[in-house]
Image: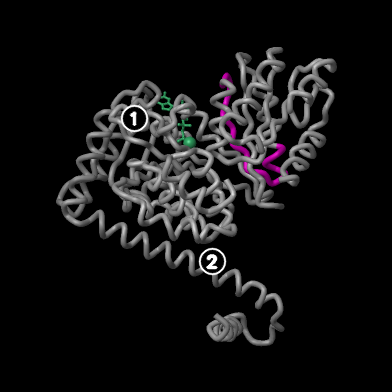
Amino acid sequence: MTTKHRILIGKPGLDGHDRGAKVIARALRDAGYEVVYTGIRRSPAEIAAAAIQEDVAAVGLSSLSGAHLRLFPAVVEELRHGGAADIAVLGGGVIPEDDVAVLLAAGIKAVFTPGTSLEEVVQAFAAVCDEQ
Amino acid sequence: MKSIDDILAGITAGQPRAIGRAITLVENQQEGSEAVLSHLDSLVCNYLVLGITGPPGAGKSTLTSRLIEQYRADGERVGVIAIDPSSPLSGGAILGDRIRMMRHAKDPDVVIRSMATRGRLGGLCSAAGSAVRIMAASGCSKIIIETVGVGQSEMDIIGLADLTLLALAPGLGDDIQAMKAGLLEVVDLLVVNKNDLRGAENLAMDLEGVARQREDKYGLPTRVCRTIASEGQGIEQLVALIAELESLHSESGEMNRRRQVSRNREVVDWGLDMIREKLEPLAALHKHEASPQKTAVQLLQKLWLDL
Ligand SMILES: Nc1nc2c(ncn2[C@@H]2O[C@H](COP(=O)(O)OP(=O)(O)O)[C@@H](O)[C@H]2O)c(=O)[nH]1
Ligand SMILES: [Mg+2]
């Protein structure tokens, strides 16, 4: 394990279901990562500010509300604004296949859909952490 | 944000990115951490380190968030180090204290850092102590360390604080009994949180009974404060009690004495870490003919010569 093994899991937007986010957080913990969890209904600015203070290697976002096209890129933008463009942003949730390419183009490093396995999610985080 | 000079300048300017980076450097003992730390002491002015300990669920994080609120209202810059245990199996951790403090997320004068214990025997104190110094150098005048009050490393962490507060709540079961014994000896203030719940009155009376039996060095019993952190009730009184103890301890010299003790402990902690780093590979290479104790003496003698 490299020293880059801190991850922040955040839930931007209005939906209050964080079961999925918590499952991911626990899987990452079990894979040896230190996972900062910031709870539900956070703004992109709040999530980015927390990620910078915690100096994480990656931020994982979960959204079930359908607002991911606005919220995920907003976190990327806030991080860039805070001088932390190197912090990778990954995201998942209820995301239609058509939106995946849009998010990737907007700088999201990996996008998880309901079909993505937990193992694939952990591998994606491992890949971006190892890159740093 | 590459050079140590950039990081040091960023810390003094209160930049979140630089502060975060600096804490990572010292936490991982990466290259540059010594350089950062050696420049910090000259930057640090007046600050108070407040330790908050207690069983999981007592309301430590909620209390911390309320204290931040009060201190911010007084115009102070606040740092928080929130420590949670690492999983002994995977080495990973879930650091969830921030959830209760997110209302301060966008306040540039609230610096929050979550830390995992990383199963270290030593090391945690040096990392947390360094984080305290980095936050102080960035202008934080109040620094709160939240830690679960179990285990030796957590007890050591308490030694970093100028004042320590034990948060308890009704309905947490046997934890409290076990915790009371060891921790009551070292804490300065008792907080009965969740004063809105059944059993709070009994718990408070029970604690007041214990507190009366042990006077502090000023002949005062340990004070018991009642709060409802989730509603913000009792926080002003708590802040007033903390301020009272702070001035008592700084006038009597107790504050300086404690800082000296905790600094000594940090020195030992760093030293032990450095020795362990050298000793472990030696032990692995060694043919184990003598007893472990004898071998240790031999290896240490070899180490002294090499150091
Ligand atoms: N009823 C009640 N609940 C509280 C109070 N303070 C905190 N809580 C709740 O207790 C739970 C644990 O609080 P938290 O601050 O995370 O505790 P910690 O584990 O000690 O940090 C949360 O659900 C809080 O909302 C209080 O004064 N009264
Ligand atoms: Mg907590």
Residue B64 appears anywhere in the view: yes
Residue B257 image position (x, y, % from top left):
26, 60
Name the residue that disc number 2 marks: B273
Classed neighbour count for the residue bearing mark 2: other residues with Cα under 10 Å, few (<14), some (14–19), many (≥20): some
In the rendered image, residue A99 lying in the magenta stretch gets the answer no
Which subunit holds the residue at mark 1?
A: B
Q: Is residue B83 left or right of residue A118?
A: left
Name the residue that disc number 1 marks: B72
Which subunit holds the residue at mark 2?
A: B
Q: Quadrant of the C terminus of chain A?
A: top right
Query: What span is in magenta?
Result: A27-42
Residue placed most toward the observer, B100 or B167 = B100
Q: Secondary structure at mark 1?
A: helix
Color style of the picture: one colour
Label 2 and label 1: CA atoms lie apart by 37 Å
Q: Whereabouts is ligand 1, in terms of quadrant?
A: top left
Residue B80 image position (x, y, % from top left):
43, 40
Number of dots carrying numbers: 2
Residue placed most toward the observer, A32 or B131 = B131
Classed neighbour count for the residue bearing mark 1: other residues with Cα under 10 Å, few (<14), some (14–19), many (≥20): some
Residue B100 image position (x, y, % from top left):
48, 28
Amino acid type of the residue that numbered disc 1 sits on in the rendered structure? Arg
Q: Is residue A119 left or right of residue B173?
A: right
